[in-house]
Amino acid sequence: MFQVIKTEGRARRGIFISDHGTVQTPVFMNVGTSAAIKGAVSTMDLYDLGCQIELSNTYHLHIRPGDDVIRDMGGIRKFFNWERPVLTDSGGFQVFSLAPLRKITEEGVKFASHIDGKRIFMGPEESMRIQSNLASTIAMAFDECVENPAEYSYAKASMERTQRWLLRCIAEMKRLNSLPDTINPHQMLFGINQGATYNDLRIEHMKQIAELDVDGCAVGGLAVGEPTEVMYDVLDHVLPFAPQDKPRYLMGVGTPENIIEGVYRGIDFFDCVMPSRNARHGFLFTWEGTVNLNNKKYERDGEPISKSCGCPTCKNYSKGYIRHLLKSKEMLGMRLAVMHNLYFYNELMSKIRDALDHGEYENFYRRYATSLSQRAE
Amino acid sequence: MFQVIKTEGRARRGIFISDHGTVQTPVFMNVGTSAAIKGAVSTMDLYDLGCQIELSNTYHLHIRPGDDVIRDMGGIRKFFNWERPVLTDSGGFQVFSLAPLRKITEEGVKFASHIDGKRIFMGPEESMRIQSNLASTIAMAFDECVENPAEYSYAKASMERTQRWLLRCIAEMKRLNSLPDTINPHQMLFGINQGATYNDLRIEHMKQIAELDVDGCAVGGLAVGEPTEVMYDVLDHVLPFAPQDKPRYLMGVGTPENIIEGVYRGIDFFDCVMPSRNARHGFLFTWEGTVNLNNKKYERDGEPISKSCGCPTCKNYSKGYIRHLLKSKEMLGMRLAVMHNLYFYNELMSKIRDALDHGEYENFYRRYATSLSQRAE
C-alpha cells in the first residue's frame, strides 16, 4: 500500500506499507547484488546506516547460489537476515548488459551465464518464478532495457513487447501468489515504463501501465547512455501520466543531483551502485563536496572524511588511515568508505523528506540540485 | 610490567601492565599486517571480539604508508584508533621471507621492497627507529629468523649475530625513548631467542638474553618448517632458562592445539595469521571441531557455524549464507568468517585463563590438546 502524505509541486512525500515493514519515501535502495553489499557491508550494518529497503539482483541469485537454494532457506530476507522490505529486479537488465550470446524472442531471452557459460532461458514467467522463490517484498516486471541512443522503430517494438511481457508477468505473479506453498503470498509487482528517449513512446506506454493492476510504476531504460538533461525531459513528460496513488521508481539512478532532480519531478524510489562503487575507488560524498582520497594531500590528514558526518567511519577513522587502507588494497578501506557513502545517501534522503515535510523542498532543491557534485575535486 | 598471578605445572596465568592498558595472559594477538586485519575487520570490531592487544608489521608499515607518516599521525594506535596495547614485530621475519635480493652483513640487511623493488637497508638501529616512529607498546628486537631445517654452523653464527644485534637494539631503544620528542617514552623491547632446532644453541642464547635488560623474551624461528613435536621439544628445553618474571612470547604460533601445548610449557603471548587466513578460505574453528564451508553439504544449511558461539557472525548469519558469499567472492563472506575465527581464538584464550584461574588446566589440556583439529572434516 502506498500513501502520498504531502506534495510540493510535483514532489511527493509518501509512506509505502508492506507485510515486511514500512518505508518512508522518497527512499534510496542500496544494491546488494548477490545478497550482499559489495565492500563487506552486512545487513546488521545496514540497520546502523539507516537503510529502509534493500535491492538484490535476480539474475545473479538465480545463477549463484540458485533461487531454489534461497527458497529452501526461507527466502532472501531470511537468507541474509534482513527484516525490512526487499525489492528484486527482474533479471532483465543484467541479461541484456552482462550475459553474452543472448537471443530475444517473443517468449523471452536465451543467454549464456557470465559465470560458466551455461545456456539459460528467461522470460516473464521464469523471472516471476525466480522472484517468487526469492520471496522479495516487491518483484519487478521482466522487461527489455534498450541502450540509448536507440532507433525509434526498435524502441517502439521493444516497448510493445515489454508491455506484452508485463501482462504475462501480472498473470504469472497472481498464479504464484495463490499457490499454497508460496513463501510470500502478498508479493507485489511493479511495472516498468520503457520507450528509450522518445516521449511519445514513453507516454503511450505509461498510459497502458496505468490501466493495469500493478503495485507501482518504475521508469526503466534511463541513465543508460543519454545525457542527464534528456533523462529529466523524459521524466517531465511521462510522470504526469503515472498513477498518482502508486509509488514511482526511477531505476538505476543516480548521483545526489539526479536524485534531487528526480524527487522534484515526482519520483519516490531510487537505486544505484554509485555510492558503493565510488566509495571503493576512494570517492566520498560529503555536504561540503566530494572528497577524492586518492589525492596525496590526505596522506597525513587526521580528520574524518566529514567533520559533520555521524557515520561509523567518520566517528572513528581519519582520511589518512582510510587512504592508506585503500592504497594497500586492504578490504577494510573499502568497507569504511562504502559505509560512509551509504550513510550519506540515507542522510540525503532523510533531508529530502524533512524538507518535504516542512514545505521547504523548493529551497532545498535550489540549494543543492546543481552544487553537490560540482564541488568535486 | 608483568606479574605471574598463578601457575599450574609450567603453565602461567599472568597480567601484563603497560601505559596503554592491561593484558590478561595467556593471550593471543591478532595480526593486523598493514594496520588492519585482513578481511575488513576494524579496531571497533576488535573491541567487540574481545581482543586485548594487536600486532602489526614493521616491514609493511615502513614501506607503506611509511613510518614517518604514521609518526606524523601520532603513532600507530592513533592511526588506526585502538586504545589498547600494540606489539610491532621487528621487520626481520618479513625481510627474510618476503623481500627478494637480500644481503645480510654484520650491519644489517639490504633488500628490495616487495612492492616497488626499491633498495632498502634495515639493521637493528633502523628497526628500532621505525618502531619508535610507530610508537607501539612493545617493540621486537631485530633478528634473523632461519628456516628449518638449518645447518648447525649457520644456525650458530646466525644466533650469535642476532645476540649482537639485540645488544644494539637495547642501546638504540634506550636512546630513542629518552629523546624529548618521542611519542612513547616507555616503549618496551622484547628480545628474541633463536638457534633453530638445536637445543644447546637455544639454551645458550636464552641464558644470554636472560641477563639483559629486556621487557620480555620471545621464542622465534619456530613453526618455520620443523615438525610440531620438534617445536614442543625446543620449548621443553629452552623455557626453563627464560626469566620467570618476564612475559614469554612464542612467535607466529599457531593452531589451537599449538597454543594449548605452548601454554602448558609456559608461554604467555601468541600470534598467528592462521585464524584469519583459514577463515578467508572457509575453514572455521568451533568447539565441536573445524567446519569447512567449501563442503557442499552446507549449501542449504540455515544454522550458524556453531550454535554455542556468541560471535556477531553466529548470532546473525547461517553457514549456507556465508558459504554463498565465499563462493561468490563477496568480501562480506571473508569478514563474517574472520570475525568468527578471531572470536573463537579469544574465547580459547579466555577458557585457558579460566582453567588456570581454577587450577584446572591439566584437565583442560587433556580434553583439548589433541582433539580440536583432529575433528576436522
Image (cartoon, coloured by chain):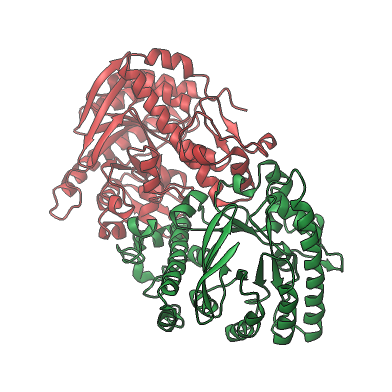
Chain colours: A green, B red
Please tell me which residue lies in front, A354 or B247.
A354
Q: Quadrant of the C terminus of chain A?
A: bottom left
In the image, taking residue A57 as reference, residue B314 lies left or right, namely: left
On screen, residue B119 above or below B220:
below
Q: Give me the residue at 36% from left, 58% from top.
A: A321
When asked about the image quadrant of residue A174, the answer is: bottom right
Splitting the image into 4 quarters, where does residue A300 fall?
bottom left
Measured from the top left, where is residue B377 in percent x and y?
63, 28
Place residue A215 in its image quadrant.
bottom right
Kindly identify the residue that appears in the image at 42 percent across and 45 percent down: B94
Does residue B219 sit above or below A58 in this rendering? above
Query: x and y percent of residue A86 in the render?
Result: 60, 56
Q: Nearer the viewer, residue A118 or B34?
A: A118
Position in image of residue A81 (x %, y %): 56, 46
Q: Is residue A148 left or right of residue A280?
A: right
Q: Residue visible at 82% across and 70% down? A: A164
Locate the N terminus of chain A and report the quarter of the image it occupies. bottom right
